[in-house]
Image (spheres, rainbow, N blue to C red):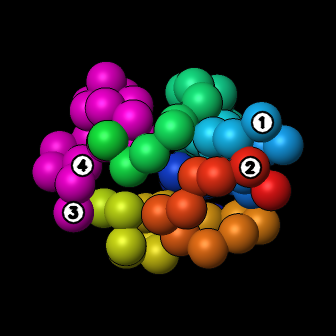
């Protein structure tokens, strides 16, 4: 089973697309944006999930970096 949250590679203009269970949650410019998307999706303790691979998969770049590729 893959992680329900995917933080995709940084876009050329900066930011990372975030999907939750296959649905686009938005474009994150930082961890605070991701936490807000997770809260809106009803995930409790969103701040603690970012570094848990069973919850969040970081693709195409280093975790917690949102600069343009």
Image point (38%, 49%), residue name: 31
Q: Is residue 1 visible?
A: no
Is there a contact, CB below 8 Å, between mark 4 and mark 3? yes
Calculate the distance from the C-alpha at mark 1 to the C-alpha at mark 3: 27 Å
**Residue 61 point in image, percent of width and height:** 70, 69
Is there a contact, CB below 8 Å, between mark 3 and mark 2? no
Kind of element beneath mark 3: helix
Q: Which residue is mark 3?
A: 48
Q: Is residue 35 visible?
A: yes
Is there a contact, CB below 8 Å, between mark 1 and mark 3? no
Residue 68 is left or right of residue 38, and the answer is: right
Neighbor class of circle 3 (other Cα within 10 Å; few <14, some 14-19, many 20+) is few
Q: Which residue is mark 2?
A: 68
Calculate the distance from the C-alpha at mark 4 to the C-alpha at mark 2: 25 Å
Q: Is residue 41 above or below residue 51?
A: above
Q: Which residue is mark 4?
A: 46
**Residue 57 point in image, percent of width and height:** 58, 66
Neighbor class of circle 2 (other Cα within 10 Å; few <14, some 14-19, many 20+) is few
Q: Camera-side residue: 11 or 37?
A: 11
**Magenta-drawn segment:** 33-48
């Amino acid at each position: 089973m893959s992680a329900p949250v995917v933080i995709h590679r940084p876009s050329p203009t900066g930011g990372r697309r975030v999907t939750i269970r296959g649905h686009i949650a938005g474009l994150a410019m930082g961890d605070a944006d991701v936490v807000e998307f997770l809260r809106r999706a009803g995930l409790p303790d969103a701040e603690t999930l970012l570094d848990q691979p069973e919850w969040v998969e970081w693709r195409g770049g280093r975790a917690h970096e949102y600069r343009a590729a």
